[in-house]
């Protein structure tokens, strides 16, 4: 039997839409990964120099205690950790996005120990949830084919990692994410693709998703994200048969994650049960702005869509660079301005307050790369978006995740009808 779908939020007045449409023009068509003045954008994990440098910090290895350079070597044994208070329906999802570009040369033993390390770190942050994002590939912006690539984990290897996270008691989400390297850079990104034959594209995507939906069903994964930030394809009637096909394989919650610009611009018409928002709302305030001001900025954005409680929405991505000027472009991965960890910590505190006050389903911080050591201090060359190893931000996360609330509509700020 087909499960009920969530009623997605209504369109708001044209006067608001006109303001929202301007924002992506100011901050780039894909503000989540790019901002004006930044380097040529591509998927965050495609910066090979950063990935290589970060790999040097990976736990595990040699007899001298230094990280192993052998991708087949397992990480150093990690103590098993277990969530004290596992997630249950009605509790907020306190989570992190783990981004995994697979290296097929790494053994199952390596994957297990690395997943144990990530699980222990998340549990130390008081998280109860984890979302595993992994790449799939397409050709140009008009291509009609989607497929696994050299960095896409196989369903079997994904099972190894999922088993660790679930043994640790973490709520799990699987989230395929289109890699953008082949799209040629801005203005082309995953939200601007225009397949020349949509029937072929959806048929190819349905075929690609099948084995991963089967893994999700086998391991009783809580949520499966059918798509992320695919602005130009939102509302296409072909999503309905894709969702129906998915439901024949997978019995858990099916979701879609919208980019923040499209979320506030109007109705997200997708046949899913769970709507997530990749939320990188720019707030034009100075670095010394108090948390209250940041909260106000977030609420001004969210109120363009609906005021009051938002119990059907989860923040599927949130984060910001630990650097000066970051409030103006929270999702800028490329700039390496002066380090300012208080900017990042204040932003995390503000986002958490908004999530709690508006009774949202939870938040997932972007991100930790699967192969990284979250216990290591980020290198100077690493993305400022990294939060692992930054004590101020980690404290903000623990403070956030250390308290729960009931997901009951109408118990947040004074509710008013959606405009």
Image: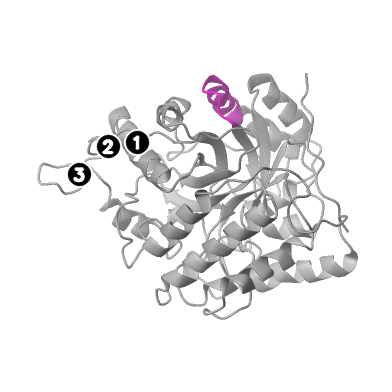
Residue beneath the point at 60% across and 43% down: 92
Q: Is residue 91 left or right of residue 340?
A: right
Residue beneath the point at 75% across and 46% down: 234
Q: Which residue is mark 3?
A: 68
Q: Earlier in the sequence, mark 2 or mark 1?
A: 2
Instruction: For the N terminus, give its image quadrant.
Output: top right
Q: Nearer the viewer, mark 1 or mark 3?
A: 1
Q: For the residue labelled by badge 3, is the local secondary structure a helix, a strand or a loop?
A: loop
Q: Are marks 2 and 1 in contact (CB under 8 Å)?
A: yes
Magenta: main secondary structure equals helix
Visual colour scheme: one colour
Q: Which residues are magenta?
A: 208-222
Q: Earlier in the sequence, mark 3 or mark 2?
A: 3
Structural distance between the alpha carbons of marks 2 and 1: 6 Å
Is residue 248 visible to us here?
yes
Total of numbered circles in the picture?
3
Q: Quadrant of residue 184?
A: bottom right
Q: Position of residue 119 (x, y in %)?
A: 39, 39
Q: Is residue 401 above or below residue 249?
A: below
Residue 401 vs residue 330, the one in the foreground = 401
Checking the image for residue 78, the label placed there is 2
Q: For the residue labelled by badge 2, is the local secondary structure a helix, a strand or a loop?
A: loop
Residue 220 sits inside the magenta stretch: yes
Q: Position of residue 20 (x, y in %)?
A: 77, 67
Q: Is residue 281 above or below residue 363?
A: below
Q: Earlier in the sequence, mark 1 or mark 3?
A: 3
Q: Are marks 1 and 3 in contact (CB under 8 Å)?
A: no
Q: Is residue 409 left or right of residue 14?
A: left
Q: For the residue labelled by badge 1, is the local secondary structure a helix, a strand or a loop?
A: helix
Q: Is residue 21 left or right of residue 48?
A: right
Instruction: For the C terminus, give its image quadrant.
Output: bottom right
Checking the image for residue 116, the label placed there is 1
């Amino acid at each position: 039997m087909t499960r009920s779908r969530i009623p997605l939020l209504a369109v708001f007045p044209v006067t608001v839409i006109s303001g929202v449409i301007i924002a992506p023009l100011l901050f780039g068509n894909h503000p989540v990964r790019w901002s004006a003045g930044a380097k040529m954008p591509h998927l965050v994990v495609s910066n090979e120099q950063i990935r290589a440098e970060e790999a040097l910090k990976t736990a595990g290895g040699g007899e001298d205690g230094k990280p192993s350079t052998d991708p087949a070597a397992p990480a150093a044994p990690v103590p098993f950790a277990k969530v004290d208070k596992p997630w249950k329906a009605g509790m907020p999802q306190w989570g992190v996005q783990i981004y995994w570009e697979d290296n097929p040369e790494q053994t199952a033993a390596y994957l297990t120990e690395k997943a144990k390390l990530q699980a222990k770190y998340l549990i130390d942050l008081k998280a109860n949830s984890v979302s595993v994002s992994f790449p799939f590939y397409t050709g140009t912006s008009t291509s009609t084919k989607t497929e696994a690539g050299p960095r896409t984990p196989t369903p079997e290897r994904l099972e190894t990692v999922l088993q660790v996270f679930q043994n640790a008691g973490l709520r799990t989400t699987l989230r395929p994410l289109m890699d953008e390297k082949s799209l040629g850079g801005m203005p082309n990104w995953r939200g601007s693709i225009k397949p020349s034959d949509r029937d072929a594209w959806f048929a190819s995507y349905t075929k690609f998703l099948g084995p991963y939906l089967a893994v999700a069903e086998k391991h009783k994964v809580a949520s499966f994200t059918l798509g992320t930030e695919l602005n130009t394809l939102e509302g296409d009637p072909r999503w309905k048969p894709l969702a129906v096909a998915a439901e024949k394989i997978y019995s858990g919650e099916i979701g879609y994650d919208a980019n923040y610009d499209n979320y506030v611009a109007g109705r997200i018409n997708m046949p899913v049960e769970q709507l997530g928002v990749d939320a990188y709302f720019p707030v034009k305030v100075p670095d010394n702005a108090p948390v209250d001001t940041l909260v106000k900025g977030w609420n001004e954005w969210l109120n363009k869509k609906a005021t009051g409680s938002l119990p059907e929405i989860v923040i599927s991505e949130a984060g910001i660079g630990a650097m000066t000027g970051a409030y103006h472009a929270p999702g800028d991965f490329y700039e390496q301005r002066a380090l300012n960890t208080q900017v990042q910590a204040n932003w995390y505190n503000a986002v958490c307050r908004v999530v709690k006050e508006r009774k949202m389903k939870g938040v997932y911080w972007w991100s930790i790369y699967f192969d990284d050591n979250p216990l290591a201090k980020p290198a100077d060359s690493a993305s400022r978006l990294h939060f692992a190893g930054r004590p101020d931000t980690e404290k903000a996360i623990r403070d956030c995740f250390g308290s729960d609330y009931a997901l009951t509509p109408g118990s947040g700020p004074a509710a008013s009808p959606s405009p």
